[in-house]
């Protein structure tokens, strides 16, 4: 029975038991109507609250460490609540759900009801709505979608429809990606507001009235990915002299005519003359949007509202200023968007935008391209976090763990949401804040450890088995494998198809037997741990060897367990001697060659392709002079890159699984290049550091090929679609090319690709984290790996980027995966380089997770008794172009499923076709009774989503059929159709098989 029904019943009975009902007037219904014939001034009270930056997340929330930065987000939520409820027309927007949630958890029911009412009345509006305001350059699409969905889920659970954001509010991220626009469209949003675009682009847009336009986020998805985009002309700060905050010292407004302090007449004129009039020629409608707030403002909200009330009253009383009529009112970005739509009829006279807003330059010579690499280790840790989060969610779901365990999963959801913040993964926070992010992420992962442990114990059917993730295996350290005579290795595959996983474990001895689930011995190889790894600071291990084996055919969403046993005694396996000549790996599809004198890779051979590929390391000396030196945000080199070493010392190790060349270039650069049997990529496993603190070095690697690439290269957009980049060129304006290197740097979140169309050759480098990259010379790929900056770049962090770990300058380790192949298939059966890259990228992004467990069992037979050694979560693999992106517990009786098509329209003759997935009888541990499609965030039923329609006057496909309309059919039989690059989200209603 609804509240309303209960109240009606009150006429007959005496008992009433329900929470107060509020009439809902949220959404566009709550917007102040605009006036025609007037300039409509939308005043936007807002506070930009970074989820960590120069203070930690908790310091910002509670206000501790106040002396270093006077910000306390808790006060903002407290005082805004008090102030907004005092007057009906006051409005405010909440943006960062991580902070909102902290505050909400502290409130009693009374305050919660006050807020519920304000939300239902549209006075307080959630916009953006993600856990944080995510960065767009160095983030991966999976983590963006996860962090949006996580915030939106909390809002939906708490407020229902009135808590549902309708707009993106990305006012601080340092440049903007196409994928993010596409994600906002997928979330069902009506638009996005941006601030930071290239200064020249902004100047032209101001001049040509193109601050507002339609942005096509995906050229594959077309019209459904179109998004209304509005760029704030100045910044997200209030107009100068109109900041009314504890931080600011601007004069308050006085409208008491009898007071000698009376100033409203003068201040009103000033406001219109200096801050509104100059904007009028750059807008397409009568609406202007004026942000009234800045970083951590509204700690005393009444200071703002008191003055804004007066300003609004004065403007509306006087109406006419300098011959024009004005109408001022409290508004929100979505009310502004609706006003523009209403007045323009949704047709904007600006060209459709089809590229992105990267890189971002704020002023001449100030390219924010340093942060693409800053804090390289933190960037990698975040990727590992995503890998484990997906594993954790999947295992939770497949075993349908009791929902009280979701608290633990939530810790990692929270942590990963925070990590996406534009001062977290970007590396633009202070050192101690970065350490705090690592702490938060570690705690999240530990909590998920206990989820995966329970889930696996359920699956293997042995309650007491203790599954551990060897998180320090990146420094070849793992207590169990080092110290035990026998142990089990369980390899879980989070991909929706069968994969092979190379397992590498630090061990003490040279002889181990590895027995697979079928009871048969598995091929193994022992390799020496490289000097670079052994010398990693903080490594607490004496092992000098790694045991390598291939876990073959791990089932989709499934695992295989291996039993590893040290031989008591026996032959000592000899490690192959150094081979100082070209070395060819056996049984590989791809080989590399090294120059026998210089010791560097100089050729790669794949199938019938023989390509010159020279790889070496260089460094840029960072510019330290001037007001904006190189730093955490900016990359400003002082001159061209310099050689670190012409030659590398090297040694070669071969075997039946892998061939490795261990190279040492200098005190701070070493590398292992390896190729595995039956694989089609080469791995470059580099170690950079420690960089001496006294020199500002920014270390890069270059792969020089003889491909003819016509100044063109491709980088990924948040790990998804390929963006075409041309040196010294921007698609929509002529840019300043005087900064040869930095203006050509782009974020490489997952890969950078060269194509030589004439010779049908392609060369790609895949990364294991975001890095800055470019192609400054034809045929050459450059990637920045690690940075040490001597000075702060004066953009707010107020600290030089000089990372330390274990009390020493940090050492960074990472991998590149190099693929060589054809642009177009050379034979009927051949797969293209792009197809190889897609599959490899998936396998590296969602790598099979290795759990080790101690076992007392003395033999394989004892160990395997009553234990399930192999498991598949799926009854069959999905097609190669489809992937289960998300499988997670949702409400008490439902799961959330996201399916994605991983190919673009022109990537592959076969795999770029639409794909269909039959969900019937797909999962082995639960049955799907029915499914219901939602928007990308999972917070709204797709059929209920209506977006404000916008289009460009230059758009000729206005009526083209959309992917969405077609998406709504075909569901009753549980068969889902996916177009290239499409992601579809479903709530699954299930019953479990047990
Ligand atoms: C490494 O070896 C040293 C000397 O033998 C020993 O004291 C130390 O405990 C060992 N460390 C580990 C982590 O095994
Ligand atoms: C939103 O939350 C409500 C409960 O507050 C729930 O009933 C509804 O199913 C949720 N919507 C979606 C699309 O999950
Ligand atoms: Zn910010």
Image: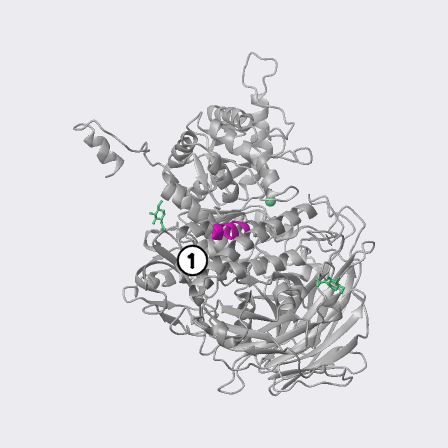
Q: Where is residue 479 shown, x and y percent of the image? A: 63, 63
**Boundaries of the magenta span:** 408-415
In the image, 165 versus 311, the foreground residue is 165
User: Magenta stretch: residue 410 in it?
Assistant: yes
Place residue 136 in its image quadrant: bottom right
The N terminus sits in image quarter: top left
Q: Residue placed farthest to the top in the image?
A: 258
Residue density around tag 1, few if under 14, some if 14–19, many if 20 or more, within 10 Å? many
In the image, 942 versus 601, the foreground residue is 601
Determine if residue 670 is in view.
Answer: yes
Q: Is residue 972 above or below residue 319?
A: below
| Residue drawn 53% across the image and 37% down it | 46
User: Magenta stretch: residue 552 in it?
Assistant: no
Determine if residue 953 is in view.
Answer: no
Q: Where is residue 447 shown, x and y percent of the image? A: 52, 53
Query: Mainly helix, strand or loop, the magenta region?
Result: helix
Q: Where is residue 545 shown, x and y percent of the image? A: 69, 73
Q: Which residue is mark 1?
A: 888
**Ligand 3 lies in which image quarter?**
top right
| Residue drawn 25% across the image and 30% down it | 16
Q: Classify residue 853 as left or right of residue 777.
A: left
The C terminus sits in image quarter: bottom left
Classify mark 1: helix, strand or loop.
strand
In the image, 262 versus 204, the foreground residue is 262
């Amino acid at each position: 029975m609804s509240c309303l029904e209960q109240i009606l019943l009150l006429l007959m009975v005496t008992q009433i038991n329900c929470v107060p009902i509020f009439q809902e007037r949220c959404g566009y219904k709550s917007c102040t109507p605009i006036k025609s014939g007037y300039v409509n001034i939308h005043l936007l009270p807002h506070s930009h609250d970074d989820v960590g930056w120069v203070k930690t997340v908790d310091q910002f929330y509670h206000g501790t460490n106040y002396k270093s930065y006077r910000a306390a987000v808790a006060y903002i939520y407290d005082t805004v609540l008090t102030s907004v409820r005092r007057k009906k027309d006051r409005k405010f927007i909440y943006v960062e759900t991580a902070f909102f949630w902290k505050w909400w958890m502290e409130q009693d029911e009374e305050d919660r009801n006050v807020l519920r009412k304000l939300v239902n009345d549209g006075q307080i509006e959630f916009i953006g709505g993600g856990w944080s305001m995510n960065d767009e350059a160095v983030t991966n699409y999976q983590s963006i979608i996860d962090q949006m969905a996580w915030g939106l889920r909390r809002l939906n659970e708490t407020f229902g429809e009135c808590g549902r954001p309708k707009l993106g509010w990305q006012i601080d991220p340092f440049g903007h990606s196409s994928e993010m626009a596409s994600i906002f469209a997928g979330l069902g949003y009506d638009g996005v507001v941006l601030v930071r675009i290239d200064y020249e682009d902004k100047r032209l847009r101001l001049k040509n009235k193109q601050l507002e336009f339609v942005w096509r986020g995906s050229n594959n998805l077309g019209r459904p990915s179109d998004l209304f985009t509005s760029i704030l002309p100045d910044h997200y700060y209030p107009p100068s002299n109109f900041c009314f905050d504890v931080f600011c010292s601007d004069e308050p407004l006085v409208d008491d005519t009898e007071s000698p302090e009376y100033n409203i007449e003068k201040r009103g004129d000033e406001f219109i003359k200096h801050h509104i009039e100059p904007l009028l020629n750059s807008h397409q409608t009568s609406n202007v949007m004026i942000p009234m707030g800045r970083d951590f403002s509204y700690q005393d909200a009444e200071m703002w509202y008191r003055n804004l009330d007066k300003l609004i009253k004065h403007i509306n009383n006087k109406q006419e200023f300098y011959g024009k009529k004005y109408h001022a009112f409290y508004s929100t970005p979505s009310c502004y968007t609706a006003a523009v739509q209403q007045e323009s009829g949704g047709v904007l006279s600006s060209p459709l935008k089809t590229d992105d807003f990267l890189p971002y330059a704020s002023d001449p010579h100030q390219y924010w391209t340093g942060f693409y690499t800053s804090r390289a280790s933190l960037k990698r840790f975040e990727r590992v976090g995503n890998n484990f989060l997906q594993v954790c969610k999947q295992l939770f779901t497949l075993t349908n763990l009791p929902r009280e365990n979701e608290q633990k999963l939530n810790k990692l959801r929270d942590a990963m949401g925070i990590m996406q913040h534009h001062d977290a993964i970007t590396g633009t926070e202070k050192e101690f804040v970065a350490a705090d992010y690592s702490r938060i992420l570690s705690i999240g992962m530990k909590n998920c450890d206990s989820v995966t442990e329970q889930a696996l114990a359920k699956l293997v059917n042995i309650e007491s088995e203790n599954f551990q993730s060897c998180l320090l295996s990146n420094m070849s350290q793992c207590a169990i494998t080092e110290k035990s005579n026998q142990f089990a290795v369980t390899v879980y595959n989070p991909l929706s198809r069968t994969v092979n996983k190379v397992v590498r474990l630090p061990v003490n001895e040279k002889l181990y037997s590895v027995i697979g689930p079928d009871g048969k011995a598995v091929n193994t190889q022992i390799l020496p741990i490289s000097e670079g790894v052994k010398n990693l600071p903080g490594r607490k291990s004496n092992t000098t060897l790694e045991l390598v084996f291939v876990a073959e055919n791990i089932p989709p969403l499934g695992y295989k367990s291996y039993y590893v046993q040290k031989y008591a005694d026996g032959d000592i396996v000899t490690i192959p001697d150094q081979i100082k000549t070209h070395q060819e790996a056996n049984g590989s599809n791809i080989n590399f060659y090294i120059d026998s004198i210089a010791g560097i890779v100089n050729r790669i051979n794949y199938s019938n392709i023989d390509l010159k590929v020279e790889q070496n390391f260089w460094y840029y000396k960072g510019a330290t002079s001037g007001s904006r030196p190189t730093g955490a945000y900016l990359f400003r080199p002082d001159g061209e890159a310099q050689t670190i070493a012409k030659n590398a010392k090297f040694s070669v190790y071969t075997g039946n699984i892998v061939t490795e060349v261990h190279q040492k270039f200098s005190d701070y650069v070493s590398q292992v290049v390896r190729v595995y049997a039956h694989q089609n990529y080469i791995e470059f496993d580099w170690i950079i550091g420690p960089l001496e603190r006294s020199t500002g070095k920014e270390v890069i690697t270059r792969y020089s090929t003889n491909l003819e690439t016509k100044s063109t290269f491709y980088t990924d957009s948040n790990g998804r679609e390929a963006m075409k980049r041309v040196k010294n060129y921007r698609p929509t304006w002529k840019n300043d090319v005087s900064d040869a290197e930095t203006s050509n740097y782009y974020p490489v979140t997952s890969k950078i690709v060269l194509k030589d169309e004439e010779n049908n050759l392609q060369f790609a480098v895949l990364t294991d984290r975001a890095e800055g990259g470019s192609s400054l010379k034809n045929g050459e790929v450059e990637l920045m790996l690690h940075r040490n900056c001597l000075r702060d770049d004066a953009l707010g962090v107020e600290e030089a980027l000089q990372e330390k770990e274990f009390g020493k300058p940090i050492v960074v380790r990472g991998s590149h995966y190099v693929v060589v192949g054809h642009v177009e298939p050379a034979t009927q059966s051949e797969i293209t380089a792009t197809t190889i890259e897609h599959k490899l990228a998936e396998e590296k992004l969602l790598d099979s997770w290795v759990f080790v467990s101690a076992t007392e069992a003395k033999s394989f037979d004892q160990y395997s008794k009553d234990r399930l050694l192999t498991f598949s979560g799926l009854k069959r693999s999905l097609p190669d172009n489809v992937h289960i992106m998300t499988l997670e517990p949702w409400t008490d009786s439902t799961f959330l499923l996201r399916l994605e098509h991983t190919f673009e329209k022109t990537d592959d003759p076969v795999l770029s076709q639409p794909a269909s997935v039959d969900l019937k009888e797909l999962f082995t541990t639960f049955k799907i009774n029915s499914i219901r499609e939602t928007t990308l965030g999972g917070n709204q039923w797709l059929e209920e989503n209506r977006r404000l329609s916008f289009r460009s006057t230059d758009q000729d496909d206005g009526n083209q059929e959309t992917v969405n309309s077609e998406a709504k059919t075909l569901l009753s039989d549980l068969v889902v159709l996916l177009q290239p690059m499409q992601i579809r989200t479903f709530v699954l209603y299930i019953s479990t098989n047990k």
